[in-house]
Amino acid sequence: PDVITVQDLANRMAEKGADLVKALFKMGMPVTVNQTIDQDTAELLVTEFGHEIKRVSDADIDIRHDEDVDDAANLKARAPVVTIMGHVDHGKTSLLDALRGANVQAGEAGGITQHIGAYQVKTPDGSQVTFLDTPGHEAFTEMRQRGANVTDIVILVVAADDGLKPQSIEAINHAKAAGVPIIVAINKVDKEGANPQRVRERLLEHELVVEEMGGDVQNVEVSALKKTGLDKLLGAIAVQAEIMELKANPDRAAEGTVVEAKLDKGRGPVATILVRRGTLKVGDIFVCGAESGRVRALIDDQGKQVKTAGPSMPVEVLGLGGVPMAGDTLTVVENEARAREVAAYRQSEALKRRTVQAPVSLEGMFEALA
Ligand code: GDP
Ligand code: MG
């Protein structure tokens, strides 16, 4: 069975996810960083990169809980998780708002959307897309550094009147380093002086070859202001997601990633969790980073209380013992004793990480391959 995602393995080896993807491709295995590989392949890669394999004890693996892998037979399709990146003022926020607005109108009229750090939108074919609404490179890289690779697809927003700018190129490099596919949204096509063709040509310099030029990078002309091209962009995301065959097991104890967390005056500690696998339910006992708790309420991106949240669904969780950090993992456990045990383990791990600033050896970096 598959044991680890390519990105997790890359993190442990202190290598770039994209380099592992490249090596796997050469080995005849076309996978993305968010896909899992089996133990033999992982070990082969480790040796290939000149690292040593060091196994941890079963007890350690057991307590990590998030290391076990679901049977392929239990996997079901899940929505892609999308991050919007691009140069300042090219329209990231406008595009996020337009996409969300389009959805609100399609849904119940006058529905109040609240900002919980992520939201879901329906594509024209009826599938869902999850957008992280903290655009920008820092959020993306920070989450990655914390080992939380939640993004499946990057939307690179480029203003058609301004073209590729330093932060556009930075975004391309971040996405490539993470091995995450890019869809280019050429924005502001309503503006005078807009030159989408020039954007497509400039993309070539960064090895992004759009479909019109014989490549496999999708690009969509949009106007966040006039709200044109939005359905086409959602369609492009659906196509990319289908190619990636994103799946998760919804029928298990939930695991998720903290997208945002805060201390709310009235409600106490609140975290927006993006469920990665399993189904999170009201009443579930969990560990979240170094905090533990019990789900008191779940609130979706429309501000509605829900009883459950499945894979790729963002949801606000009430009932935390304290405020976790963005990028932390939430893991549902069987009882409170177990929750305390895992929380204590994580606290000691966090302490270790803080004390050992730089890994002393390659073996040290690669400690936990099961
Ligand atoms: P961000 O910095 O990437 O989040 O960019 P914003 O969404 O804040 O947009 C920057 C400016 O560009 C704002 O004044 C927007 O109104 C404007 N803008 C965004 N999208 C479009 C568009 O499609 N057409 C036009 N004409 N202006 C746009
Ligand atoms: Mg903005």
Image (tube, helix red, strand yellow):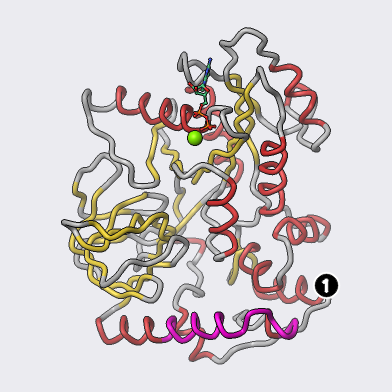
The residue located at (43%, 67%) in the rendering is 329
Pointer 1 residue: 48
As shown in the figure, which amino acid type bears the numbered disc 1? Glu
Image quarter (top left, top right, bottom left or bottom right) of the N terminus:
bottom right
Farthest residue toward the left?
266
Q: Is residue 286 left or right of residue 180?
A: left
Q: Which residue is rendered at x = 46% and y = 27% of the image?
A: 94
Q: In the rendered view, does 334 fall on the left or right side of 33?
A: left
Q: Which x, y percent locates residue 16? A: 73, 61
Helix, strand or loop status at disc 1: helix
Image coordinates of residue 118 in percent, x first then y, are: 40, 45
Instruction: Give the quadrant of residue 166.
Output: top right
Asked if 360 appears above or below 161 in the picture, the reply is below
Instruction: Judge whether residue 359 is colored magenta.
Output: yes
- Does the Cβ of the disc 1 residue fall within 8 Å of ligand 1? no
Rendered position, 131 above or below 353: above
Direction from residue 217 to residue 351 in the image, left or right: left
Q: Position of residue 319 (x, y in %)?
A: 22, 66
Residue 250 vs residue 165, the one in the foreground: 165
Q: Does the magenta segment cover residue 69?
A: no
Q: Given the current orientation, which residue lies at the most extreme top position?
A: 192
- Rendered location of residue 266, percent (x, y): 16, 56
Instruction: State the quadrant of the C terminus.
Output: bottom right
Q: Residues within 10 Å of mark 1 (few under 14, many from 20)?
A: few
Q: Residue at x 47, y 45 (%)?
A: 134
Region in magenta: 345-363
Say which residue appears at 68% left-offset and 22% top-offset.
162
Please tell me whether the stretch drawn in magenta is mainly helix, strand or loop. Answer: helix
Residue 173 versus residue 320 in the image, above or below: above
Residue 186 in which image quadrant: top right
